[in-house]
Image (tube, helix red, strand yellow):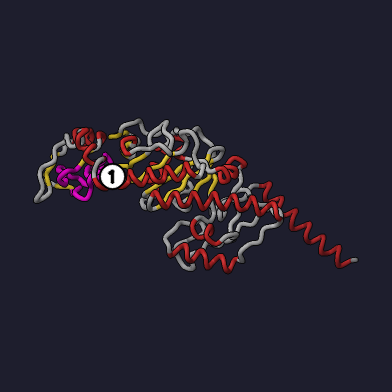
Amino acid sequence: MKSFDLTQYRVVAAEDIEAAARAGATELLVREGAILTPSARDAISARGFSMKAAAGTKAVGATASSASEWDRLFNSPEAQAIKLEIIQVGQKLWQRAYVDGNGGNISHRLTADTVICTPTLTSKADLKPEDLCLVDLQGNQLAGGKPRTSEILLHLEIYKAVPEAKGAVHCHPPHATAYAITGRVPPTCVIPEYEVFIGKVALSPYETPGTQKFAETVLPFVKTHNTVLLANHGIICWADTVTHAEWFVEVVDTYCMTLMLAGQLGSLTHIPEDKAADLLAIKQKLGLPDVRFEGTGSGMKECQLCDLPDLPGSISLVPKTCVTPAGERPPEAEIEAMIQSITDAVLATINKRSQ
């Protein structure tokens, strides 16, 4: 009988059972107190696996995912600390007017396969520990006093795509959201703190909030950005803790507000690219993501480190990728515009010399 070791998991999910099946196992080795998700329990039954407790532990049966077991996990000391942190973040968001009514949602990964999140239809200023919810990575609610937010699907896609993501905050800060609803993003290389902690932001396409399609709009961006502007909606930030994710929200919105104020005074000045490279080196040492990192050599992709606005004094620009994917041609209209720009420049030079 071939065993498959699952003792590193406190919560066993269906994907773990499928991994055991692919390995040709017939027996599952689990830890004491392991929790089986409903889909994992179904997979065990369908595959006909037997279960065995790890050496020195008590046997864990297929009923380990009962409500009492989920409640025990949800009320563990680790979970209680996360709940208090989420409540504090909710109050900060409300105090800074980043959420209104019952808007916004907050989540924090509890285990590899479970997440604590805020409930639906509850102001972030009024959150209590008993209001919060426990869900698995498929969005199934496992415990909690109120129904979970429908937008948890957005958070879950980030957690599945970015293993280092532990906390996420979605909200509607007015200045950053103003960029999101105008279809533009703030330029880079203006303020050092923003460059280090955020840098380039992405703009995802609009989809109906709370749907799976909406959740998937951020997938092209989350591995290389910790902040995404959600078109006609708001923003989502992720980090190693939910507190740090809230910090990123503050940095983004303050930056957008500062740009708007500076735009009233005149043209923006920018950090030189060589100095911007220094800031990106600091960012890389901190382990923060940036689309301009390559991960090898100098750590920078061969693209402009600083995105400058289209027009002098402008405080926003049209989102664009760092590089054109290999094998793809730029749109014909873009090629024609480039040719026309080069032609105009050459003709202007010739005209000057002939005068």
Q: Which residue is mark 1?
A: 79
Pick whichever, 56 or 262, lies toward us: 262
Pinpoint residue 345: horizontal percent, then vertical percent.
Answer: 77, 60
Task: Locate residue 90 relative to residue 68 in the image: left or right.
Answer: right
Pinpoint residue 299: horizontal percent, then vertical percent.
Answer: 48, 65
Residue at screen point 36% across, 33% down: 148
Quadrant in the rendering for residue 269 = bottom right
Residue at screen point 36% across, 39% down: 117
Residue at screen point 22% across, 44% down: 20
Residue at screen point 29% across, 43% down: 113
Task: Locate residue 320 relative to residue 336 in the image: left or right.
Answer: left
Pick whichever, 128 or 110, lies toward us: 128
Q: Is residue 33 magenta?
A: yes
Q: Is residue 333 magenta?
A: no
Badge 1 amino acid: Ala
Pinpoint residue 354: horizontal percent, then vertical percent.
Answer: 89, 66
Residue 236 visible in image:
yes
In the image, which residues are magenta? Answer: 5-34
Pick whichever, 173 or 180, lies toward us: 173
Pinpoint residue 189: horizontal percent, then vertical percent.
Answer: 59, 60
Residue 338 visible in image:
no
